[in-house]
Amino acid sequence: MTNISFRDSALCAIRGLFRGISSERNIKIQILIGFIIISIAILLEISKVYLITIIIVCFLVVILELFNRGFEKLIDLISPEYNKEFGKVKDAIAGIVLLTFIMAMIVSFLILYNPVINLLKEISKNSFSILLMIANIILFLIILLVIFVKNKN
């Protein structure tokens, strides 16, 4: 076993994290969705406990997706040709990620539902606020579109 410094170990971990994020479309999408949900939670000023819960479930999805990526790469190294049993293992791990994503969406929905409904009720009392909210949503979507188009090139 080699003695690797903490700094070098941390750099390897960071490199692996960025490699996983940059090479996997699903991770990018999950990070984007998590960022949107966490941003909404912060804007709605939900309690810290709820915010921490949302952050945990969003991070858990990305963590498990990175684990899934690493495990798939390991299986591909062990068995470069298709193997039905390894395929079942890959599918099972992908299923775990999917279930975690569904859980994160349900938890986020349950936490954010009432605050979003209350905000919409307040906004509906003022037509200018509705126009401002629509303009902000359109601007946000344009920014996301620009980010995605830039990343594709």
Image (spheres, rainbow, N blue to C red):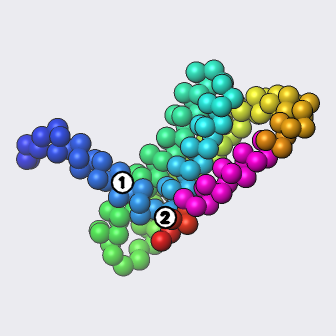
Q: Nearer the viewer, mark 1 or mark 2?
A: 2
The residue tagged with tag 1: helix, strand or loop? helix
* Residue at 32% across, 62% down: 74
Say whether residue 145 is visible: yes
Q: Amino acid at mark 2?
A: Asn
Compared with 56, 146 (above or below) is below
Near-viewer residue (95 or 41):
41
Q: Earlier in the sequence, mark 1 or mark 2?
A: 1
Q: Residue at x 79, y 46 (%)?
A: 134
Is 135 covered by the magenta stretch? yes
**Residue furthest front as drawn:** 128
- Residue 3 lies left or right of residue 40; in this view the side is left
- Image position, residue 67 (x, y; %): 40, 51
Q: What's the residue type where badge 1 is placed?
A: Phe
State if disc 2 and disc 1 touch (CB < 8 Å): no
Q: Which mark is residue 52?
A: none
List the single residue furthest toward the bottom.
81
Vertical arrangement, residue 47 with respect to residue 120, above or below:
above
Horizontal relation, residue 39 to residue 94: left or right:
right
For mark 2, does the 10 Å Cα neighbourhood hold few (<14), some (14 to 19), or many (20 or more) residues?
A: few
Judge whether residue 91 can be spotted in this image. Answer: no
Give the tally of numbered discs: 2
Q: Which residue is mark 1?
A: 18
Which stretch appears magenta? Answer: 133-147
Residue 44 image position (x, y, % from top left) = 69, 29
Q: Quadrant of residue 48?
A: top right
Tell me how far mark 1 sits from mark 2, CA to CA.
14 Å
Q: Which mark is residue 151?
A: 2
Q: Nearer the viewer, residue 14 or 102?
A: 14
